[in-house]
Each structure stands twice: as C-alpha cells, then as structure tokens.
Image (cartoon, rainbow, N blue to C red):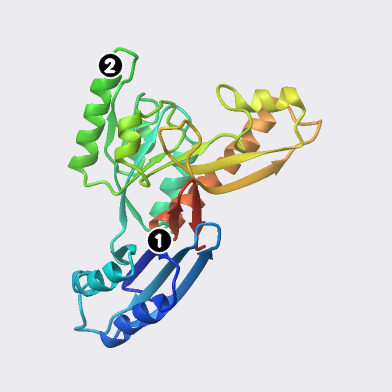
Amino acid sequence: MRADGILTLHCPDRPGIVAAVSRLLFEQGANIEESQQFDDERTDTFFMRIAFSVPEGGPTMQSFRELMAPVAEQLSMDWAIWDAHRPHRTMIMVSRFGHCLNDLLYRWRSGALNIDIPVIVSNHDDLRPMAKMYGIPFVVIPVTAETKIDAEIRLREVIAEHDIDLVVLARYMQILSDDLSRDLSGRVINIHHSFLPSFKGAKPYHQAYNRGVKLTGATAHYVTADLDEGPIIEQDVVRVDHRMTPDDLIRAGQECESRVLARAVKWHSENRVLLNGERTVVFS
C-alpha cells in the first residue's frame, strides 16, 4: 500500500462524516488507499482511519491540516493528519532484561517498524553493549527513592532533546510518576509480563507456576497514572503444562512479551490505535 498521509479521527456519530472527509480528499486530488471505521454504540462515538496518497505537486500534509480544520470543527472531531513517510521518533527504556529491546532493534533495523530510535534510556548500564552494536546512544539515568524526581527531570530533558513521539517501556522496571504519565498520555507503551489483570508485581512467572496455570501471556498497554490499568493495545497467551519449570515459563513468556510489544509498537507507529476512554480501537 502506498500512502502519503494518514488521517485519524473520532467524534460523535452522525450522518455525513465519511462523505465530508471523502469529499475533502477528492477535491484535493488525493486517493484513498485504505479506509477503516468503527461505530462504538456504547458511547455513540465514530472512529475512522484513512490512508491516502497525494499526486506529485499536490497539497502538503500541512495544507491538508488547514483544509481539514473547519470540517473537523463542524463535526466536533478529535483528529490528526500524519505524514506517512515520517517514522515515529521512539525512545526505548529498559532495565536489565534485554529480550524485548533486542527484538525491537532487530525489527527496526530490518525495516519492519515505522520508527526511528535516536536514544535508549536505562536505569542500569547492563544493556549498553546491545545499544552500541546497533549504533544507538545509550543514556543511563539511575533511579532511587531519593533521586526519582531529579531522574524524571533528566528524562524529560532527553525526550525534549530528541523530539520523541513515542516512549516504549521494554521491561523498564521503574514506575513513571503520575505527572509524567499524564503529560505523555497516549505516547507511552508498556509491556506487562503477564496476561492482565493477573499476577501483578514481582516474579509473575513464579506466581503463575505456583498456581499451576494452563495459560500465561503478555499485555501491551498505554501507561496511565493507574499502575498497569492503562488501555490495552494487544495481548497474547502461551499454553502451559505440568512439565514446564519456572525457567521454561520465563523463556516462553519472554518470547510472548517480545511479539506482543512489537505488534503494539507497529500498530501505534502506523497510527492504527485510537484511544476510546479506558479502551482502544485498533485498526490492525
């Protein structure tokens, strides 16, 4: 699929939304390459994602934004137009577990993710060699109970310095403050090492083993001030049987975490995820 721009929107449902948007694109010579929509009857809210191409010499994305503004105001839309050729500038945050980082870096290097990774941030130095192998700056910001406020000030500086669009917590074992979570709402994806809402806290796979679970999994979600309660983007599960040890469970879980996080990052970076209160609409 060739696309130059991506329009995402949600608004109160009413007749004429699709017609108004399609007419605007048609009048500017744009061609709709992909269109998906969803009407949430619970909230009477309409969601839409359109990928469109523009003929050579046609309007810029900024021109489309200016043309779209009065239409959006008339229909009370929450909307955005993204340049499909601009990768999302993504900061990955890690602690000491490297499986999710390694997977994301491989997918990024192979061109499977619509992201750039200008910096990796950690509260430990353990994964610096992995970042060095991929040629990505690695910034260590130690975090203790006494330094947490200063650490977040530094973290905000790094985000601003690198013009970050998306933050990915790839097994970053620190909790972001409520203020930072609110300021970055819809821009921070976390991978939780269990199939939420079960087995929160430390050693989730050992908890699962002790309970004799038959399914475990992973959950990618947006970060909010409510710990591990943010809108879920993607989940997957792993079959478990009595022969598996805790180490087997950890290995299976890490593979699951990696693929779930990768899907969430891919869909977000392609502007396929729209927030819907405590839920998400995912145009996968």
Residue furthest to the top in view is: 146
x, y percentage for residue 203? 59, 23
| Residue at image mark 1 | 270
Residues tagged 2 and 1 counted as in contact (Cβ below 8 A): no
- As measured in the structure, the alpha-carbon distance from the residue carrying label 2 to the one carrying label 1 is 36 Å
Q: Looking at the image, which is closer to me, 179 or 130?
A: 179
Position of residue 210 relative to residue 71, above or below, is above
Question: Which residue sits at x=34%, y=64%?
Answer: 77
Q: Quadrant of the N terminus?
A: bottom left
Direction from residue 277 to residue 67 in the image, left or right: left
- x, y percentage for residue 30? 31, 83
Out of 192 and 126, give the one closest to the viewer: 192
- Kind of residue sitting beneath label 2: Thr
Residue corresponding to mark 2: 147
Residue at horizontal 62%, vertical 47%?
Answer: 236
Horizontal and vertical percent position of residue 241? 79, 35
Task: Tell me the kind of residue under disc 1.
Answer: Glu
Residue 183: image location, x then y, percent? 29, 39
Dot label at residue 208: none
Which one is in front, 264 or 63? 63
Looking at the image, residue 268 sits to the left or right of residue 179; the answer is right
Task: Identify the element where label 2 is drawn.
Answer: loop
Viewer-closest of 214 and 135? 214
Instruction: Using the rendered view, name the quadrant where residue 75 is placed.
Output: bottom left
Name above or below for residue 269 compared with residue 36. above
Residue appearing at x 31%, y 33% in the figure:
180
